[in-house]
Image (cartoon, rainbow, N blue to C red):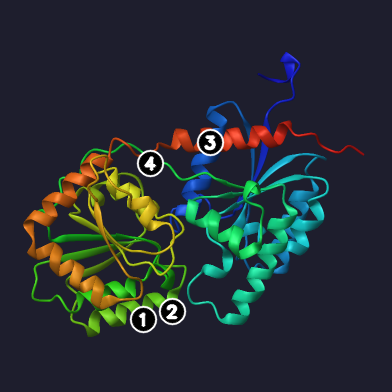
Amino acid sequence: MNAADGATPRTVHAILPGDIDDAAVPSGGNTYDRRVCQGLAAVGWRVREVAVRGSWPRPDAAARTELARALAALPEGALVLLDGLVACGVPEVVVPQADRLRLVVLVHLPLAEEAGLDPATAADLDTRERRVLHAGSAVVATSPWAARRLVERHGLAEDRVRIVTPGTDPAPPASGTDGASRLLCVAAVTPTKGQDLLVEALAHLTDLPWSCVCVGPLRRDPAYVAQLRQMIEQSGLGDRVYLEGPQTGERLAATYAAADLVVLASRVETYGMVVTEALARGIPVLATAVGGVPETLGQAPDGSVPGILVPPEDPAALAEALRRWFGDDSLRRSLRSAACHMRGILDKWEQTSHNLAGMLEELRNEPWRTT
């Protein structure tokens, strides 16, 4: 329905990170934002995107000014979906707009949960995020774990936090390499994703036939990337661990297709979109049991489990699990079978957009004060 039919158009203004479409720095958060914007448009919403460049969540004065202008330009009562990376670090910009705009804050990861933050910075980000989330009309969390964490961390009412999990795209089953030896890690190369833990584990497995391809942006933390390259060389793994940089589209699909096992050594993970991307292709997963990952991995309808979970920050446990993977053919068959069973029950992106659209429609229909 449109304005000509006598109804107010269903419009949402999406405030997004400026790098949302930068192929050099793909991220799960950006993918989520892009797909829900496309999905909302597909079900009849008018989506007005505003991408704001800046070093979020700690931007400079110019970025704060740009965000302030973008919000001030929106009409009274406008429905606004703000990516939490942009919004939650700048309450001085966002909170004053809460009296005139319907603000929905989309939180991919609580700001203070990012690995490697010093305590003072984490505490400051936590305080800032709390102010923004309490000022908004609603909060969207991308996993049940994230919703629980936000309620506990910030004292939010449970009914103000809605869960809208990511979807997946259908994909053909991965053929793999030889059924065991090709390991794949898909994640931005940052301390949060724990590639250093993975390299430390692999250094204890040089007697086994494997190779490991790490796919993900290298620009987010250059110092960590340099440290990781040094670890790889000092461990004698230069011809077995490959930092391939970011991949998208057909190139990433081909990399998945060649994988036998997807490995995720994260220190923090809200949902773990790479887990469902692997399962959509029938690839088993070895991951750290952090955040929302155990719920995301789930189990097949027959109760079988499509992966292995290990404690976080434990390279020895990661190495032990990998040794089990290589040494037990029946385990590999069981995990692959469960992963293949999962392919048919994963939620699609259309469901994600439907869930978010329903939540936004409820908020849109709530009475709004007039001046």
Judged left or right of residue 35, residue 363 is right
Query: Tag 1: residue type?
Result: Gln
Q: Earlier in the sequence, mark 2 or mark 4?
A: 4
Measure the C-alpha gap from mark 1 to mark 2.
6 Å
Quarter of the rendering occupied by the N terminus: top right
Measure the C-alpha gap from mark 2 to mark 4.
32 Å
Residue at label 1?
227
The answer, for residue 56, to whether it is visible in the render is: no
Measure the C-alpha gap from mark 3 to mark 1.
41 Å
Residue at label 3?
355
Q: Residue at x 54, y 57 (%)?
A: 148
* Residue 168 circle label: 4
Image position of 273 with respect to 239: above or below: above
Q: Residue at x 22, y 49 (%)?
A: 283
Q: Mark 2 or mark 4, which is nearer to you?
A: 4
Judged left or right of residue 254, residue 176 is left
Image position of 19 with respect to 118: above or below: above
Q: Earlier in the sequence, mark 4 or mark 1?
A: 4
Q: Mark 3 or mark 1, which is nearer to you?
A: 3
Residue at label 2?
223
- Residue 37: give x, y in percent of width and height: 55, 39
Judged left or right of residue 22, residue 313 is left
Q: Mark 4 or mark 3, which is nearer to you?
A: 3
Query: Tag 4: residue type?
Result: Thr
Q: Earlier in the sequence, mark 4 or mark 3?
A: 4
